[in-house]
């Protein structure tokens, strides 16, 4: 009977549950053999022992037959090359094809996916999860995602990643012609009268510049005034008059929105907006300035500082997700979850988008998934596929052996009883 037990699969461990069921089924068969020997030896002692012998004898036959059937699925019983045994190893390619076709026909057909997705409320599930403060604050998924995010950020090369991000942004900016965008933005600001703060800022800047450089301006006026004016001291009077005139002019421009010079400035801004959109020379100058700015080392240094601060902030948030979820970000997520539960239109839109995405994925990638499954199973060796299938269904197959032993015994005792009645 030792040869009946199935040997361990090479390269893999037998699960404890399967091992226990094998021992139980084989032990029951051995027990029936022992009972048969004892009953056969003492059959003359009492007529009832014949029923015990018949039960044990038929139970051995049933158990051995089912052991042979179960074993023949995965290997040759007793190592003998009996025809139509070791079914799984010999037909693994056909199993791969059949399993792939089953997966394709029952799970990856777009109409099947659409019908199943109609029963799933993705938006409602997401809303309940997001609005659950305990789920956001203490969930295992959140903590795992936090550790994964922090580990990824720490493992990446800081300078290289920052350079890659900067290069990607710079590449996108180089491809975008910003001159027409600036022109349209300026034109829209003029139409909506939002350019006035710009003119006010220019006026204030001019006043501060004159005030900061007043000694230099006085020296320039004095040097241009001539010798006679300097001898008579009128150069200082002239400088005071010119500076006072400039201050008064800027003050009038700041206080009077309809000042003629402001109108000229507005006209100049309108002309600039049109040139930025239509004048090729102006557009070329803006593009050249943009490229010079992108190539400037100072911009690279500035970006590196911004990236360092952003990376530090992301690491701090990833390492302490409780504070992040307790802040505005967590509150925003909870509000989003409540909105998903309260707004049927939004939930319907999200569910429809998810359903269409799943149907599209099944349509576009279904064949690829099927090929992946089929090719993966075909790539397994006979021992691998045998071991995995046996681990998956082997425990239930051992129940077949046990049931075969018991049912065989009942059939044997029934046949013996009929024989006794007919004799």
Image (spheres, grey):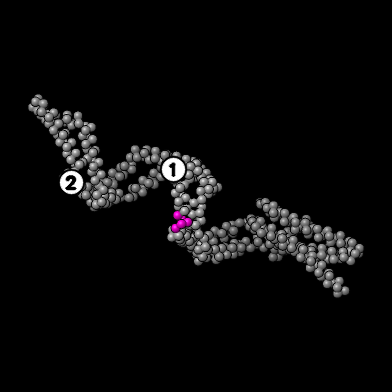
- Numbered disc total: 2
Numbered tag placed on residue 161 in the rendering:
1
Residue at the spot 37% in from the left edge and 46% down from the top edge: 169
Q: Is residue 213 above or below residue 413?
A: above
Residue 21 seen anywhere in this rendered image of the structure = yes
Give the mark nearer the N terminus: 1 vs 2. Answer: 1
Question: In which quadrant of the rendered image does the C terminus lie?
Answer: bottom right
Residue at the spot 22% in from the left edge and 40% down from the top edge: 203
Closer to us: 84 or 252: 252
Rate crowding at label 2 as few (under 14), some (14 to 19) or many (20 or more) other CA atoms within 10 Å: few
Query: Residue 156, percent across and down?
Result: 47, 42
**Majority secondary structure of the magenta segment?**
helix
Question: In which quadrant of the rendered image does the N terminus lie?
Answer: bottom right
Query: Residue 133, percent across and down?
Result: 51, 48
Q: Is residue 150 above or below residue 391?
A: above
Snapshot quadrant of residue 102: bottom right
Looking at the image, the residue that sits furthest to the right is 45
- Specify the segment rendered in magenta: 339-343
Q: Which residue is mark 2?
A: 258
Q: Is residue 402 above or below residue 233?
A: below
Q: Which element carries disc 1, helix, strand or loop?
A: helix
Is 222 colored magenta in this rendering?
Answer: no
Residue at the spot 13% in from the left edge and 28% down from the top edge: 236
Rate crowding at label 1 as few (under 14), some (14 to 19) or many (20 or more) other CA atoms within 10 Å: few
Query: Residue 141, percent across and down?
Result: 54, 48
């Amino acid at each position: 009977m030792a040869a009946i037990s199935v040997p361990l699969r090479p390269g893999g461990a037998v699960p404890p549950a399967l091992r226990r069921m094998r021992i139980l089924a084989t032990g029951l068969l051995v027990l029936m053999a022992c009972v048969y020997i004892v009953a056969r030896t003492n059959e003359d002692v009492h007529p009832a022992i014949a029923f015990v012998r018949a039960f044990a004898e038929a139970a051995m036959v049933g158990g051995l037959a089912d052991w042979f059937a179960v074993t023949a699925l995965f290997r040759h019983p007793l190592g003998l090359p009996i025809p139509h045994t070791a079914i799984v190893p010999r037909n693994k390619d056909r199993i791969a094809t059949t399993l792939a076709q089953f997966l394709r026909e029952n799970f990856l057909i777009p109409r099947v996916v659409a019908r199943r997705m109609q029963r799933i409320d993705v938006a409602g599930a997401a809303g309940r999860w997001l609005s659950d403060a305990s789920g956001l604050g203490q969930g295992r998924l959140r903590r795992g995602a936090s550790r994964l995010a922090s580990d990824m950020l720490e493992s990446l090369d800081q300078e290289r990643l920052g350079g890659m991000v900067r290069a990607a942004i710079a590449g996108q900016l180089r491809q975008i012609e910003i001159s027409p965008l600036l022109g349209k933005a300026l034109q829209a600001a003029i139409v909506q009268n939002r350019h006035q703060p710009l003119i006010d800022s220019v006026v204030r800047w001019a006043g501060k510049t004159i005030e900061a450089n007043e000694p230099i301006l006085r020296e320039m006026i004095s040097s241009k005034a001539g010798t006679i004016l300097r001898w008579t001291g009128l150069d200082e009077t002239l400088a005071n008059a010119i500076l006072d005139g400039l201050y008064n002019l800027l003050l009038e421009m700041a206080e009077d929105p309809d000042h003629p010079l402001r109108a000229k400035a507005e006209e100049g801004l309108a002309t600039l907006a049109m040139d930025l959109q239509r004048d090729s020379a102006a557009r070329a100058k803006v593009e050249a300035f943009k490229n010079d700015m992108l190539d400037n080392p100072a911009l690279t240094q500035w970006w590196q500082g911004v990236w360092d601060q952003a990376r530090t902030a992301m690491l701090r948030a990833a390492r302490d997700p409780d504070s992040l979820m307790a802040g505005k970000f967590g509150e925003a997520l909870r509000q989003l979850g409540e909105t998903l539960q309260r707004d049927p239109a939004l939930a319907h839109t999200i569910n429809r988008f998810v359903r269409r995405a799943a149907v599209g994925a099944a349509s576009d990638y279904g064949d690829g998934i099927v090929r992946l499954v089929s090719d993966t199973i075909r790539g397994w060796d006979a021992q691998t596929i045998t071991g995995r299938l046996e681990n998956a269904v082997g425990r239930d197959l051992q129940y077949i052996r046990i049931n075969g032993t018991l049912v065989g015994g009942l059939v044997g005792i029934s046949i013996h009883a009929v024989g006794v009645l007919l004799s």
